[in-house]
Amino acid sequence: MTSLFRYFDQYNILSEEARTAIRAISTIQTIRKNQDLQPIGHTCRAIYFINRGLARIYYFKDDIDITESFAFENQIIARVESLFSGKPSRKGIQMLEPSEVVAIHATSLFSLYDAFPDIERLFRKIFEAGYVDTVNRIESLQFHSAEERYRDLLESSPDILKRVPLKLIASYLGITPVSLSRIRAQH
């Protein structure tokens, strides 16, 4: 849990009582490589912090597997639209490596907001940062070339080529594996 609270401290430092309350509603889970943490069609009921491993959010469109995002160690991942709406998600979360995550039970977390305003403030800041990342991702797809998106990905995640299959990287970039090979050959 040390890494989790170090991550939280970047956004908002919690009181010891708030930390104890979060520990009480959290469990550590071990997930195998290529196993779904949350399958498509399920309602998200937890916020996950990745202690070890690598995850992706994915969906299918016209029977094509599309990667929406990646999350690495010391990052949060959740299907937020499902978490807040209580409806099943059309997207899933898959672990791409043997992984360990801290699962924070969402309903219990939200019930802590009134008793611990610092927890509410923390998660507001985390969700705001996630929203900004989503907007930046959409704008990247709208305004940047595939080559620019590839360079940005390598800059933000330098070891991604060692850890993620190229077909998933191509899908994330919104291009074909052949186009990705051409871009990589130029660098």
Image (cartoon, helix red, strand yellow):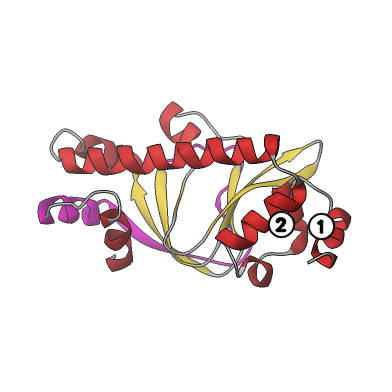
Quadrant holding the C terminus: bottom right
Quadrant holding the N terminus: bottom left
Where residue 180 is drawn, which disc sits there? 1
Dot 1 or dot 2: first in sequence order is: 2
Q: Residue at x 49, y 37 (%)?
A: 43
Quick check: is 23 in the magenta stretch?
yes
**Label 1 packing within 10 angstroms: few (<14), some (14-19), many (20+):** many
Q: Quadrant of residue 135?
A: top right
Nearer to me, 65 or 152: 152
Q: Residue at x 12, y 52 (%)?
A: 15
Question: Marks 1 and 2: CB-CB under 8 Å?
Answer: yes
Q: Which residues are magenta?
A: 16-45
Q: Position of residue 24 (x, y in %)?
A: 22, 54
Q: Residue at x 78, y 58 (%)?
A: 167
Is 166 located above or below residue 42 in the figure? below
Q: For residue 5, say whether it is visible.
A: yes
Q: Position of residue 79 (x, y in %)?
A: 50, 40
Quick check: is 49 in the magenta stretch?
no
Callout in the foreground (1, 2): 1
Q: Position of residue 134 (x, y in %)?
A: 53, 38
Nearer to me, 149 or 13: 149
Where residue 169 is drawn, which disc sits there? 2
